[in-house]
Image (spheres, helix red, strand yellow):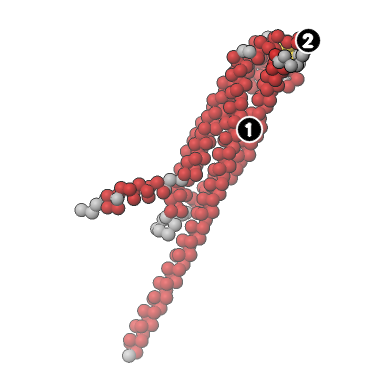
Amino acid sequence: LPLPRCVSTGCFECCIKCLGGVPYASLVATILCFSGVALFCGCGHVALTGTVTILENHFSKVTSDHALLTDVVQLMQYVIYGIASFFFLYGIILLAEGFYTTSAVKELHSEFKTTACGRCISGMFVFLTYVLGVAWLGVFGFSAVPVFLFYNMWTTCEAMRSPVSNLTSVDSICVDVRQYGIIPWNATPGKACGSTLGDICNTSEFYLSYHLYIVACAGAGATVIALIHFLMILSANWAYLKDASHMHAYQDIKMKEEQELQDIQSRSKERLNSYT
């Protein structure tokens, strides 16, 4: 009986060949994409909940004043669930597409042939990844807004506690969140001053939400980098598949011409033999 392929060629050579078919670039991009989306979705979800708690306890004591904000936060949290689910599936699909195109390139000179449907799907992934990359640039910019707002509050609290500032009246230093459009102007109290502002900065909700927003912003940035990486990989793979299809078409034409030439030569020899 013939030995299996891995046994006859050697286990080491078989493993090297299998590892050579792994799309390492797509694998790295997938891990980076999963990490970025997980950081953005997980930290963003918890940070939004902490933000609502801070507003309810210190800036808007009447429930009707921040009812719209609560609904928007809940909607954003549901959107986060959808983003996490979508990118989990999309990352797996792109990784599978990377395995497909890697196999197509490795088997360029064998019987493996790419189809027009496969090249069309690769082109569709290039376009979709480009659109998602542009969208995530907007998400990255939007996620930097709460970081800026929390940073302003934190620097204000640090200025009040700093002995170098020489502040005569700490109570005159205030942070009014109504000016950012988060809550309406008729919300009470709407602002925090002096020691009240210092107490807000010392709460665990403020500390946790501030740092979680920073991590969520970093996760959005990592996702943008991953999508750019995916875009470069998909563009290169699509070009390889296009070249592979042209190469196969050239080889088919060449084989047909050689076959026709052999047929002509064989017929010529038969006629010459018949005359002689």
The correct choice, above or below, for 156 with respect to 237 in the image is above
Question: Which tag, 2 or 1, sits closer to the chain's start?
Answer: 1
In this rendering, position of residue 16 left or right of residue 136:
left
For disc 1, the neighbor class at 10 Å (few under 14, some 14 to 19, many from 20) is: many
Q: Which image quarter is the C terminus in?
A: bottom left
Q: Residue at x 63, y 39 (%)?
A: 134
Determine which residue is flagged by label 2.
169
Residue 218 in the image, given as x and y percentages of width and height: 59, 31
Residue 110 in the image, given as x and y percentages of width and height: 40, 58
* Residue type marked 2: Ser
Q: CA distance from mark 2 to mark 1?
A: 38 Å
Residue 11 in the image, given as x and y percentages of width and height: 30, 47
* Residue type marked 1: Phe
- Front-most of 86 and 98? 98
Label 1 element class:
helix
Quadrant position of residue 58:
top right
Q: Residue at x 45, y 65 (%)?
A: 251
- Front-most of 229 and 194? 194
Answer yes or no: is residue 93 visible: no
Quadrant position of residue 59:
top right
The residue at the far bottom in this view is: 276
In this rendering, position of residue 105 left or right of residue 175:
left
Q: Residue at x 51, y 58 (%)?
A: 243
User: Foreground mark, 2 or 1?
Assistant: 2
Label 2 element class:
loop
- Front-most of 257 and 189? 189
Determine which residue is flagged by label 1.
140
In contact (CB < 8 Å): disc 2 and disc 1:
no
